[in-house]
Image (cartoon, grey):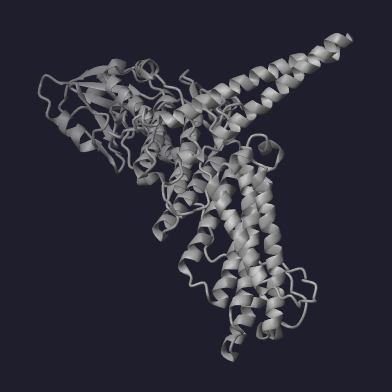
Amino acid sequence: SQQGCDPFAQTQRSKLQHRRARINQQINKEMRMRAGAENLFRATSNHKVKETVALELSYVNSNLQLLKEELEELNSSMDVYQNDSESISVPMIPLGLKETKELDLLVPLRDFISEHYGEEGVLFEKEIKEFMELRQAMRTPSRNEAGLELLMEYYNQLYFLDSRFFPPTKTLGVFFHWYDSLTGVPSHQRALAFEKGSVLFNLGALHTQIGARQDRASLPGLNQAIDAFQKAAGAFNYLKENFSNAPSLDMSAASLTMLVRLMVAQVQECVFEKMTLLRAQNDFLARLQLAQEAARVEEVYSLVHQTMSQPHVKDYVPFSWTTMVHVKSEHFKALSHYFAAIALCDCPAPSDAELLEQEKAFLQFHVTMPEGPSLRVLLQDPEERRKLGKAHLKKAIMKHEEAMRIHGLCKILRKMDILQEVLSFAHKRSLSKYSEIDHEEDFFETGEAPDIHPKTHQKPEIKPPNFSQVKVTDLFHRLGPLSMFSAKNKWYPARRVHLMRGENGFGFTLRGDSPVLIAGVIPGGCAAEAGLKEGDYIISVNGKDCKWSKHAEVVQLLKSTGKEGVDIGVITLQGSECPRAVDRKAAAMSSGSGMLKSNKENSRKSLMNSKSASTLLVWSKKSKRSKKSTYSGVPFTAVGDNEAMY
């Protein structure tokens, strides 16, 4: 069976989680104190009291500020997840996993099995414990493929748990507790959808940690990072599209939109790094392409920054994240102008053969046309190229300085030496290029360089989770085929019938497999006298469980009985059909809108169940017809094609 990491080896992460939760409690306490002090401040007219309260308020506010900064610092402990390589890669943003409380399902599942399925709940303790062990393991997945598979396995197992133990009209009465990944605030719900959604969130978060750990100085590392961030985006996107009304902020639509965009931007940044690694950068077209890739990275990070600055997201996203994203958008804008300048100043003027291709590329390079001579003249005149290159460098330097200024505003990022190094290296590189091409006798005013048109050769993909890659078997398989033995079906208590074989056989027709259905009973025959009815399902023959048995197996068991007859266990579905759509609607409405609903998420399930639903409906229609035909005097030999008479 799958195992999680050793929880003690993972303590760094759970320590973070406990500290987050503790700081949140302190913040709530300070907020209550502040509210009380503010009310008193407004209510009193006594000057002395007002002064004391004002002093207390200033204390509370500065305390709050400190607590928020502390929380901030925790949320940015990216070093827990970063790689150990010496090479300089700009840090990426990983997410912490959501933590959950232990869950004891032994009694609720045992009771449900006894009440709903009429089986001995105690006999299923092994399966229940196995499920609980799987849940325990998935709380601490290792940061690799095995960890991802463990989360997938548990997620797939929840599908079976849902079908077996969660009827549409009532809950198990168990609460699922999960902590917010960023604030540590706990939430709980009875809906299994909350458990599913949280596991899905952790699948995305684990992908972000795997992506952030890759050594992006090598091509394999870059490709793995791209894959991981694309899959993270896919998990968050799937969660956003299939689950709604989450009780915790990290799973709100606004948060998930922001996370998907952040992951896409991180992919785009890796694509840029891949270009710099692969291309011989000394040719003109390659440099133009790099400039456009950088402009594309700037564009996606600007979008993330906008998303992070929206009302519902702003107060909740760590300030260091927002700052990092803002810094990156300025940094890549600077790089796009730097590479444009290098293309113009470091590459020789084109030969006649190259001119057409370069002119075509340059035509789509700027957002607006640069002022001055025509492109053809510009490309062939080194002096004109230098002029425009200088304008691009001037803009690059301004943007580098802006990136460094924003970086300096965030206490946490200031501690990140790597980011600092990358920014100052790029800044110095642009400065030295500028002084190299700047002539003392330049009398012209350096113009305003137009921005570079963003373009990428590799568009990020949002890769949804592929649940079918991890095969699981239903742990509660012994309860019988799911199409029948599910939480939504109800049946009358099992009956034991002793049946003797008459000279014309048992006097019934059987149809179908797993479980076999008694499709018709001959009036006055042995089966009718023993009390069997059409619509009964055979679940045992002489004490042998037949829920999963094929048609031929059941027939074989019946045929091998002697004079002493045979004991048959049967059940009858209540209503002999699936719950009607009306009831389902009522159930959905009564489940309360405050719950995390999984809307489309259930379509897989309903697809699987609709098959069985239609066959059941067909059965009940057919059996009604055959009833009529029997009583209207038609001899009972009109047996359907897939029925057999015994």
Q: Outermost residue toward the front? A: 440
For the view shown, which residue lies furthest in the left direction?
562
x, y (%) of residue 360?
63, 80
Q: Vertical placement of 244 versus 176: above or below?
A: below
Numbered circles on residues, count: 0
Kindly identify the residue that appears in the image at 64 percent across and 50 percent down.
Answer: 327
Viewer can see residue 617: yes
Q: x, y (%) of residue 383?
A: 70, 82
Q: Nearer the viewer, residue 645 or 582?
A: 582
Relative to 141, 37 lies left or right: right
Is residue 157 left or right of 396 when viewed as pictured?
Answer: left
Q: Quadrant of residue 372?
A: bottom right
Q: Quadrant of the C terminus?
A: top left
Residue 175, percent from left and from top: 49, 20
Res 180 → quadrant: top right
- Name the foreground residue: 469 vs 506: 469
- Which quarter of the rendered picture does the N terminus lie within? top left
Q: Is residue 619 visible?
A: no
> Please, is residue 162 above or below residue 292 in the view?
above
**Is residue 486 shown left or right of residue 297?**
left
The residue that appears at 65% across and 17% down in the rendered structure is 29
Q: Quadrant of residue 114?
A: top left
Taking depth in this image into account, of 620 and 29 the one nearest to the observer is 29
- Give residue 456's position: percent from left, percent from top: 57, 65
Above or below for 9 versus 231: above
Q: Between 478 and 244, which is closer to the camera in this rendering?
A: 244
